Image: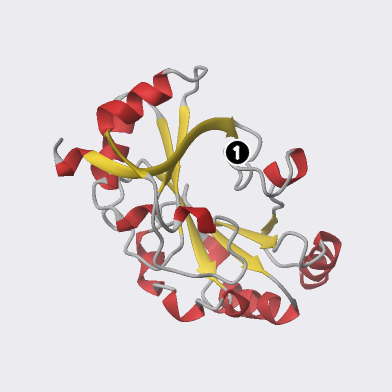
Amino acid sequence: MSATRRLRITEIFHSVQGESTHAGRPSYFVRLTGCNLRCTWCDSEYTFSGGKWMSFDEIFAALDALPACNLVEVTGGEPLLQTAVISFMQECLDRGLEVMIETGGSLDIAPVPDDVRKIVDLKAPTSGEVQANLWSNLEHLKPWDELKIVVANRADYEWAREQIIARGLAASNTVLISPVHDVLHPRELTEWVLEDALPVRLQLQLHKFIWDPATRGV
């Protein structure tokens, strides 16, 4: 098996998008193994190790066995740790699929094909990984890409507000702001956003309201 056409996979499944402006859309999910960050509120620690090496052909065969869908999200862990993911996403595009990637924002997004919709995290202080933010990624965002900030408390929110305003983040891209599930009440975050007229889109993790938050493969 060619090392350039394989990926270490934690899981492949069919569900609905739980986040981003595409929330609620049926989607394939290809979840890669491995992450270089250790966010305090991480909900996918099971991706840090294990997984199974799969060739691109095996991955596409697994997708073909699922109900028909034209959207695929590549996620993790941190999918950009595996360099072969770039050519995998291009092959998805070549097959006529709409492609999204969720990345933690600490690795260079420049190699990602332009037509891939990138959801890029900005890590707030309570994540424990604020120093990992690769701010040069902002230069590589396309208008259809989105920024996501997860906040656990008021201090995180004020950090997010400062970045959004000082860096003009909402001028060209949708900025998603999300409370840590079961840590910060959505109403409290909503009130802060409304009070400040902050140019963001509030998001909740839809899948955690449909299924038990600990459920995998959804």
Q: SS at mark 1? A: loop
Camera sees residue 173: no
Locate residue 1, reporting x and y percent. Answer: 15, 35
Locate residue 115, reporting x and y percent. Answer: 36, 40
Label 1: few (<14), some or many (≥20) within 10 Å? many
Q: Quadrant of the C terminus?
A: top right
x 38%, y 52%: residue? 79
Identify whether 194 is placed above or below 87.
below
x 55%, y 55%: residue? 44
Q: Which residue is mark 1?
A: 17
User: Which residue is outermost to the left?
Assistant: 2
Q: Which quadrant would residue 207 be assigned to in this image?
A: top right
Q: How is the protein colored in the picture?
A: secondary structure
Q: Nearer the viewer, residue 105 or 21?
A: 105
Camera sees residue 166: yes
x 74%, y 44%: residue? 212
In this figure, what is the number of numbered marks?
1
Q: Is residue 40 left or right of residue 64?
A: right
Locate residue 119, reporting x and y percent. Answer: 49, 53
In the rendered structure, which amino acid carries the disc numbered 1?
Answer: Gln
Q: Is residue 63 left or right of residue 84?
A: right
Locate residue 70, reporting x and y percent. Answer: 47, 24
x 85%, y 61%: residue? 187
Identify whether 5 is placed above or below 198.
above
Identify whether 210 is placed above or below 123.
above
